[in-house]
Image (tube, rainbow, N blue to C red):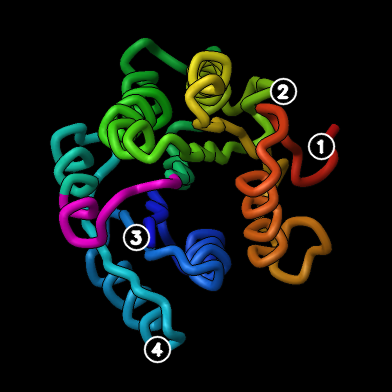
Amino acid sequence: MTTIVVIGAGPGLGAAVARRFGREGFDVALVARDPERTNALAADLAREGITARGFAADVRDRNSLAAALDAAHATLGTIEVLQYSPVPHADFMRPVLETTADDLVGPLEFSVHGPVTAVRQVLPDMRELGRGTILLVNGGTAVVPHPDRAGTSIAFAAESAYGRLLHDTLAGEGIHVAQLIIPGAIVPGHPRKDPAVLADTLWTIHRDRHEFRHFADDLEP
């Protein structure tokens, strides 16, 4: 069986996606900065009959992210699905007129350097399989920039452009690249933004392989 890598795995969306794909027979690699968190989640999944392992990496550290993905491949085998969904830092969300060039380094490392590093690590596996899925998860500022959240607005737009370029370039190789926009917060119990509902949405995107951009809910005004 092949593997899904969830980058930014936590107790909300990451855990829900791990369970959803795990139920479909995927092994699961959980990547986040906190090894205790990923190892605890992997243990919970194992008790549910899902093969999962935790790997520590900071997405802003390209070497650590590449090493974690290499370890995931070595431990669990071929990577078929990559989900990139870490939660941005609060200090990325400064008003535009208070945002300096230095303030954009972190957001761009987080939302551009991280995805590019991850994709380049997993692409050989997908090409060898002749199929694969890359799922980019972003907030609403990826499509509607907000003047009080300049860092994420700028970096998410760049990530969106990268994803779209990948979508158009890799489709002929059987590799589907898609973006899910989640406006506002992930809300347990919400009919469209509950973690389990979002995990179902991501599974459907992987399965149906239609279009690049998808919306979990209506964009906020």
| Marks 4 and 3, how far apart at CA | 16 Å
| Distance Cα–Cα, label 4 vs label 2 | 41 Å
Select label 4 or label 1 by which is in front. 4
Upstream in the sequence, badge 1 or badge 3? 3
Q: Position of residue 141 (x, y in %)?
A: 65, 28
Disc 1, disc 3: CB below 8 Å?
no
Q: Of discs 4 and 2, which sits in the foreground?
A: 4
Which kind of residue does numbered mark 4 sit on?
Arg
- State the image coordinates of residue 80 (x, y, percent, origin top left): 41, 46
The amino acid at mark 3 is: Leu
List the residue tagged with mark 4: 47
Residue tagged 1? 220
- Which mark, residue 62? none
Amino acid on which the number 2 mark rests in the picture: Val
Q: Compared with residue 166, is residue 78 higher up or lower down, i.e. above or below?
A: below
* Residue 9 x, y percent position in the rendering: 41, 58
User: Does residue 79 belong to the magenta stretch?
Assistant: yes
Q: Which residues are magenta?
A: 71-81
